[in-house]
Amino acid sequence: MEDNNNENKKQKFGFSIFKFFKKDKNETNGHSKKTALIIAFILFVIVLVIFITSFKQQGNGSVKKASNESVASSYHTELENRLVNILNSVSGISNAKVFISLSSSPEIIYAQDITENDNGSSNIKTSSIVFSKAGTQTTPCEIKINYPKILGVLIVAKGVSDVKTKMTLTNCIGAVLNVPISCVEILEGK
């Protein structure tokens, strides 16, 4: 009697679906076996897709590190290119090349969510970076970027052999980039 009740309960709660996957020894055609294999394959593909997408979302940290390096590289390159364009636009100066030495790479400051838990005996502060989601891409929220200090500037250009021209350019570059004039060197190019 109890076995009959348990069987009725199993069927009532949807456990009868497992009968679909049971092998029938008297079955001669393979239709239900093929159907079961197709369903198993579809479930396998769904689990595989979920598994792969979870790795892509976890990989965003390495992307952000690369992004930080690209900010440093683009800042440095942009600074040098702007200086080259300005120098090449000065009358009598041509073929300018610039090298700028920086103290470090730019530091990106991210928005943080700070929570404070007071459990009586100790006060615990935890912080986590705030992320924004745009479609399928998740990125940390940047508050500001602290750019590094310029340590020195080297300029090689044609038309800077005159002492007066060198001094004028040295003073201008020192003022514009906020570096001491002793950290600016200008050489005559080929």
Image: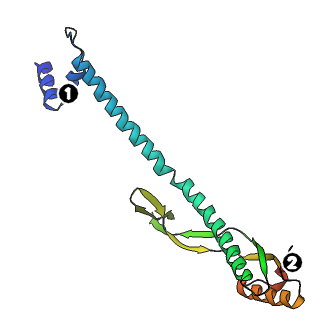
Does 38 appear above or below 80? above
Q: Which mark is residue 187?
A: 2
Q: Position of residue 168 (x, y in %)?
A: 81, 90
Q: Residue at x 87, y 78 (%)?
A: 188
For residue 62, say whether it is visible: yes
For badge 1, the amino acid type reads Ile
Q: Which mark is residue 96?
A: none
Helix, strand, or loop for circle 2? strand
Q: Quadrant of residue 6?
A: top left
Helix, strand, or loop for circle 1? helix
Q: Position of residue 162 (x, y in %)?
A: 89, 87
Of circles 2 and 1, the one toward us is 2
For badge 2, the amino acid type reads Leu
Front-lying residue, 46 or 120? 46
Does 101 appear above or below 93? above
Image quadrant in which the N terminus is located:
top left
Image quadrant in which the C terminus is located:
bottom right
Q: Position of residue 121 (x, y in %)?
A: 49, 64
Q: Quadrant of residue 182?
A: bottom right
Residue occupied by mark 1 = 17
Does 172 appear above or below 9? below
Does 55 appear above or below 76? above
Proximity of marks 2 and 1: CB atoms separated by less than 8 Å: no
Q: Quadrant of residue 39?
A: top left
Front-lying residue, 129 or 97? 97
> Label 2: few (<14), some or many (≥20) within 10 Å?
some
Residue 165 relative to residue 145: left or right: right
Q: Residue at x 83, y 78 (%)?
A: 158
Residue 162 relative to residue 70: left or right: right
**Which one is earlier in the sequence, the residue at label 2 or at label 1?**
1
